Image (cartoon, rainbow, N blue to C red):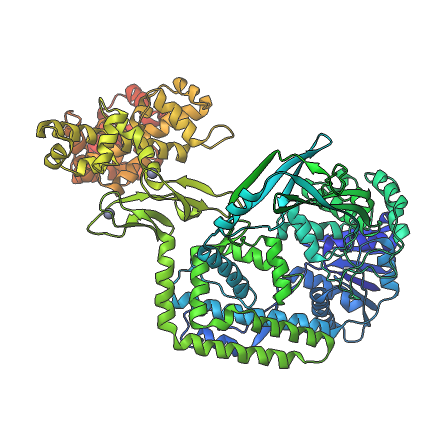
Amino acid sequence: MHLIIAEKNIVAERIAAFLAGKEKVQITRDGAAAHYVFDDTVVMGLRGHVVEVDFVEGYNNWRSAEHPPKSLINAEIIKKPTEKKIVGVLQKFAKKATRVTIATDYDTEGELIGKEAFELIRAVNTKVPVDRARFSAITKDEIVKSIQEATSLDFNLAAAGESRQIIDLVWGASLTRFLSITAHRGADSILSVGRVQSPTLAMIVDREREIEAFVPTKYWVLSLTSEKAGIGVEARHVHGRFTDYAEAKAAYDATKEPVKVTDVITGHKVDRAPAPLDTTALIVGASRLGISASYAMNRAEDLYMRGFISYPRTDNTTYPKSLKIGEQLEIFAHGAFTKEAAYVKNHLRSVPTRGKKETTDHPPIYPTSLANREEIGDDVSWKLYEFIVRRFFATICIDAEWETMKINMSAGSEPYTITGGRILEAGWRGIYPYSKAEENILPVFAVGDTLPLLSKNSEEKETQPPARYSQSRLIQRMEELGLGTKSTRHEVISKLSGRKYIEGNPMKPTIVGRAVTESLEEFAGTITEPTMTKTLEEHMTDIAAGTKTINAVLSESRSMLSGIFEDLEKNEAAIGRDLMERTREEQTIGPCPVCGKPLRIKRVGSSQFIGCSGYPDCTFNTGLPPATWGNAIKMDEVCEIHGLNHVQLLRKGAPAWKIGCPLCSHIKSNTDAFLLLPGMTEEGIRKLNAVHIYTISELISRGPEVLAKNLGMSTSAAEKLIREAEGVLALLKKRTELKKFISAHVAPKRGRGHSKVSAAMISMGVTDVEALSRADPASLLEAKLSEAEAASLVAEAKSMVNISRMKEYGVPAITLKKYVNAGFDDPEKFVAVHPAGLSLATGVSVTTICNHQKLVAEKLCRPSPEKISKVAFEEGIAPLRKKADPELLTPLALAGVYSPELLVKADVKTLAKVSGIEEKQIADLQKYAKKVAEK
Ligand SMILES: [Zn+2]
Ligand SMILES: [Zn+2]
């Protein structure tokens, strides 16, 4: 059996379809792992890496004294399966296979994934021949050919990938642990450090410092307007920028008529068609289309796997000879690009353009098959596909040609110039709208022409600071410095933003990002410099070339890292202090409205709030939604009223929740409560806020004397206000209870959330659970409850109210539970029932019951029910127990009959009615009771 292993399931499915024809393939799904069978062949997909590298056991505990961060440098590394199901399926087939073909992606990562599969195969089958198919596009021709011409795995290339995995694990884990522990960071705010990540972050921080240090200088540019043959023209002063105002002024003053044409120079310019696309150029192009680097790569990979484009991770900018340009163009003779393809055919260049790099692994990125919009699906993928198609067209189109014109002139003593251009041959520009070149067609000038001076202008400008890095610019810069690879650069940027080290695009560092960088620069600068990373990167390439061994490079990396740790450990205390000092600012949002000390975002477990750094002297604080809704983060915006930074909650996989100014939001959320005070107005609330009363409880705790002084009112008026506030507080408490009750008892439905139901009830006057217990269920239908729901809700509320009344009356919780279980939660019913029956129903002793009944009866202002002694009860019930069915005893006792004597006295008919026992049964029992009584 021939086993073919692809990197992903979707590729496996396509490979099987190409080799067998779709109808012939049998699909078997085994949980996460599908495989495709035809003839004597099985094709299966991995999920990228199915094993991962990790430290041997014992290194997981960050606080371990035995294994400090430094010990990770030389800790043993092992491989662990991450996709056990897939590994299981792979090994099941590997045992039976007579040939295995590895058809993972054709790059370092793919080679490593292939080698991982190889090792799993060898573990169960030492003999089966394993070969390697390499392809750059998932099209039928490429796939069939690559499997026919399969060669062997490149173990050097895989080792290069493996060395990167291990080095990144060791560097990242040891440095991140060291820094996070040193700076006393919690588990949700670790400070991550990485070999590629840290120098990249340093570039962004560096640029920010340049921007801050930038001092703009003024300069002036001069221009004049004139006309020729009725066409307006603008000429600029040949000097360019004047940095000296006096000079600019002198030149401006000297600009005067006559304006005379001194030179007319026409030329010819070739505007070269762009080079084929590599990964970096793809990212740059995507960024012009408004697509972020990592999203562009994600979409490009999807297009590749679906067979629409060639492999998007490539450094090559030269098409291989084997690529048949004519055939590729023919693909587009029909479909969305028919017109453009025809144009290209008419403007075909003899040889496609070529860039500076030529590698032999992959071709540059080009479209491999025709697609229409529907097939492609989302807008972003389509934009990207169209860009790749048009770029391919441009690279095989003739150059554009321009006629250029330069008109020199003098205005008084001052030299001016105009440049213009006209397209002679549009060439590639006819189908490539992504880089525009504007024509500027000038009227015909001749040397010696005298022109009117319509106006002269001196414009004052300022030099601009360097621009922040855009993602694509940063990726280009990383490539120049040898940081990361074509496959990892965009991931590094995503990581930096995921760790909240950078924000925005163009990117700027956050407070933490800057703090980490500056602290490292000060104490262990080599981590933030690109040199070491670049060296390692080059040596990994040497492993692939076979000129260095993986062990040599790993031990070189370990000694570099040991050197770094020497610096770090020497400065441990200083780094900790420095980082804490630098990051404190990230939590500080502005002055406390009460005492003026800094307010900080604080976190205790999952609850977070804004508190005053003057605590406990100042107790000002405002709540924030719990961290489960997202971590509270300070924003740049500042509230104009309170001078506090806005706050937002960062949620995983959802847009940020903007709280805004925490004090404004605090005031707003307490407005409704204040308005419940009799006669309270918005103006009144402002007065309270002005003396730092933001909540009802703050109003109460102020006390009548201070409040009177604060608000300029009499003490008695302040007392009244406080009493009213206490009333509101009680009301709010009850509302909260009602809301809790509703969310516990009403199932949420679409369009009927808990808060909607509560709000509807409150608006109809049902403001607490007590009112709900008295409500007519029919009236609750307005709150979108069904009849059954309303009835059960009222019953639940009644029971809750009853229980809390019984508690209030002094019935202890444990016994109360027994009463409730037996159905006696209603105080009225409880005092009316006979203690003997209640004792039998609940197992509580009669004495206790009598005491409780007395307690409740007093509270209800009712006479206490009949009291019976424990002895009387037990002596009475004992003979009845001997004869009567135990199930009959409770109803009898509830009706007040608990002894033979009482039974003899009872009227059979009445007792049957009250107890629900059949007359005949009672009569039989009575006969027995008579005998007992006679004795
Ligand atoms: Zn304060
Ligand atoms: Zn505010």
Q: Could you tell whether 554 is left or right of 774 in the image?
A: right
Q: State the residue at coordinates (55%, 62%).
A: 200
| Above/below status of 627 relative to 704 | below
Q: How many numbered dots are placed on residues in this image?
A: 0
Where on the picture, by quarter, is residue 186? bottom left
Towards the viewer: 137 or 805: 137
Q: Do we see residue 590 in this rendering?
A: yes
Q: Quadrant of the N terminus?
A: bottom right
As drawn, is 168 to the left or to the right of 651?
A: right
Q: Which residue sits at x=47%, y=32%? A: 748
Residue 550 at what x, y percent from top left?
Answer: 65, 78
The image shows residue 143, relative to residue 96, as above or below, that is above
Q: Is residue 31 visible?
A: no
Q: Quadrant of ligand 2?
A: top left
- Residue 247 locus on image (x, y percent): 51, 50
Instruction: Judge whether 415 appears above or below 452 on screen.
Output: below
Q: Nearer the viewer, residue 63 or 666?
A: 666
Place residue 451 in its image quadrant. Answer: top right
